[in-house]
Amino acid sequence: MAEPSRRNDTDERASRAEAALEEVLAERNRLWEELHRQRADEHEAAYYRQLYHQVVSSRSWKLTAPLRSAKWFVRQVPELARRLRRFLSHRPQAPR
Amino acid sequence: MTGIVTVAIPVLNGAEYLDEVLSAVRRQVIDAELELLVVDSGSDDGSLEIAQRHQARIHEIPKIEFTHGGTRNLIMELAQGDRVAFLTQDATPAGDRWLASLLEGFDAAPGVGVVFGPHETRPKASHVLKAEMERHFANWGGGAEIDVQSIDRSPQGLSAYRAEPWRFTFLSSVNCCLDREAWQSVPFREVPYAEDQLLGRDLLEAGYAKVFHPDARVLHSHHYRSFGFLRRYFDEYRGLREVLGYREPAGPLRTLRSIRTLYRSDKAWLRRHGIRGARLAWALAGSLRHHTIRLTGAILGSRAGRLPPGVRRILSLERRSTFEPLPVEESPLLRSDPLVDVRADWGWEFVRRAYPARDVLLDPHSGRTRGATTSAWIVPPWGIGSGGHAVIFRLIAELERRGHSCAIFVFDPFGWNARPGADLRQEIREHFTPVEAQVFVGLEDFDSADIAVATNWWTAYPTRDLPRCREKVYLVQDYEPSFYPASAEELWTEATYRMGYRCIAYTPWLADLLRDQYQLEVAELDCGTDLDTYPFSDEEREPGLIAVYARRETPRRAVELAFAGLATLLERRPGVRVVLFGSPFPQTVPFPCRNLGVVPPSELAALYRRASAGVVFSLTNLSLVTQEMMASGLPVVELDRQNVRSVLGTSGDLATLAEPTPDGIADALEAIFDDRARAMEMAGRARAFVEQRTWNRACDELEQAFADFLASPRANPERRSLALRT
């Protein structure tokens, strides 16, 4: 009776080890994918960073800088006017 | 170090600094005997008396015999030391370790022929000269570390040398130390100027190394008024033009930009040295003046040949009115030829680097095959519609569906692709198959894989040496050596079958060929067909309409043979209409027809459903187009050859196999037109044949092949195939 029991025990340990190994391998594959995804993301980010620098250092971007500044200034006019009014009135603005 | 070291100085009326220079030389601390050698070319200002006071060995030559190169060769002959340090009469060693540092430089690398040190300006020199000297010597070891220059003769090394030769060859005979043995094989050239630049170049090109030692400093600078500087630079650059052919780049914008760059560098230097406010403005005005004068002198000097002799004399500090280019032999490494494009990124470099031949690199492993695998697919760049890539991506997608992990690496030795991996991945997902695998350009991101898969002959070279792989598999889609005439490519392609890959081939014919001819271990894989895109149609077809795969840029499609057969058919039979497809290029055809060019699969499927016969020829592996036509129920004419018979059986089973002659092709097409019932029966069998060949089955075969390969780890991963050993 002792023989089959020992065999069963060995089989069980073997199947537990096999299951553990499968888990480890699955985890390894997940990490492998994660590594590749991360590297791919890094490359993509680097590519778009480079593209951005190409654009902002291009001649056309520099030539059109005054237009962008003017647009920014026009958008700031209401805020500047508000600040100017507050400055002229020497009063802190009442909370709304 | 023992023996004799010589310090040599050519002198002509150098009394102003000579005493200081010789005193500094006599203060040098070295463990060798010091020989002080002065070669005078007619001084009359007391220089000789100064030299005698310092116990220098004096050798006199007539002034007319002096040349920078020739006189230094004479010095080397006269000197007793094995190492000869050169100074000029106004270059004072900056410390007592100057000579020891120069000698130490010879130990910095094997084969050092010459060592040189930096120049420091004298205390009274302007900030412009100080900044200029610092900037210049910072090119070697940042100006602070020992730097070895030698020519790496690989394509990349030669390209770096050709891009900036001065960075390699620069040498100043104002402050350097030459090894006698090196000089004996590479003496100074007998030139009036730039002898040091030529020596630097010649030594490096002869295989010697050159060393910069930051501690071998000398004090050396000139002070002139503005016009004096202009004249000095004129002389210097005239000399460079005469001897080296150097021409200072010039142009209104370019020159202004150069001045601006130098001005900014000076500004940064001045700020680093705490100069601010009005002093900064004043100093920068000086910078602007100096660099303008310097560039004017350089531009005029290097174009002195265009100036009248009188103007040359006025512009020369030496009062020399001549311009005499010297026949100095051009450097074979720097020579440029309009008919030669020297490139470090030569496309075939990957093959050259793959030798000496070796087997695939494999990691030892247990042979375990259960569970999901990781596979890296190394693919060449593609165009939309590429059949080979469609198969690869389809297989990857199927593997992923079964839980395996994949990554795609685009190997692009010819620089055909300029897009990032993310764009390529998007393209695969939009135009081929929606894969999950990440896509990388190049192999730098390769980490590891259970299986690395080479997918064409180029990719077999880098895949062979990828590290951390349990198995290397070669997906052989066609017999690629036959794509080339007798050529290097043919030899290199064939060599990939001797790298020890385990192969997966698409057809029995290809598998047998690889087994018989190269004794390779080959698994077979039957390609699937996209049955949804190419649905079967047994409806009435347009009589006489023939769809012809006319991709003539792929010679193995034998398009001209198809045209010859069709021309014969058109002579025999009225009412035949031909539609060509598959090539983006215009076609030259001996009969009227339509050319659709490259069209999407949906349009092709519509053509296959309308046409009465399809013509596609495969001289090597069976074309996927054949299977797609068969899936659509289109009776196909293929060539009667072993490669086709191995898949499609005998003529009439699944396709009509034509004798490869114009009449044979016309006969096969006429047979299809004349016996429609038989043709449609054949088309039905062909559809049933294709239906068995699903992508699912292809992936089963691929998975099985991977498992079989992994289950039998190589006994000796370092083994070499027999062919390679011989």
Image (cartoon, rainbow, N blue to C red):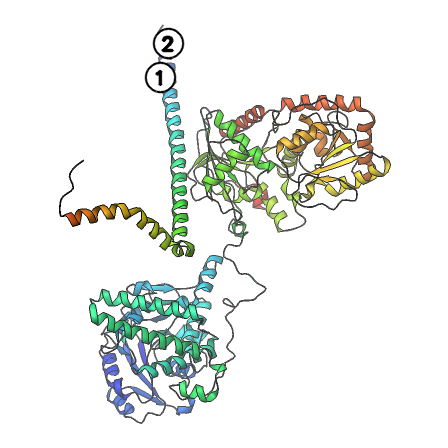
Image marks 1 and 2: residues in contact by CB distance under 8 Å: no
The x and y percentages for residue B211 are 35, 67
Q: Is residue B318 above or below residue B131?
A: below
Residue B152 appears in which quarter of the rendering? bottom left
Is B247 on the left-hand or right-hand side of B672? left
**Which residue appears farthest toward the left when viewing the image?**
A91
Please name whichever residue, A69 or A43, is drawn nearer the observer in this view of the structure. A69
The x and y percentages for residue B112 are 38, 67
The x and y percentages for residue B334 are 49, 67
> Distance from label 1 to label 2 (Cα)?
15 Å
Q: Quadrant of the N terminus of chain B?
A: bottom left
**Which residue appears farthest toward the top when viewing the image?**
A1
Q: Alpha-carbon neighbours of circle 1 within 10 Å: few (<14), some, or many (≥20)?
A: few
Q: Amino acid at mark 1?
A: Arg
Residue B536 appears in which quarter of the rendering? top right
Q: Amino acid at mark 2?
A: Glu
For the residue labelled by badge 2, is the local secondary structure a helix, a strand or a loop? helix
Please name whichever residue, B201 or A56, is drawn nearer the observer in this view of the structure. A56
Please name whichever residue, B164 or B592, is drawn nearer the observer in this view of the structure. B592
Residue B112 shows in the view: no
Residue placed at 46% from the left, 77% from the top? B241
Name which of mark 1 and mark 2 comes first in the sequence. Answer: 2
Residue B44 appears in which quarter of the rendering? bottom left
- Residue hosting label 1: A13
- Residue hosting label 2: A3
Residue B382 shows in the view: yes
For the residue labelled by badge 1, is the local secondary structure a helix, a strand or a loop? helix
Residue placed at 24% from the left, 89% from the top? B53
Which chain is home to disc 1? A
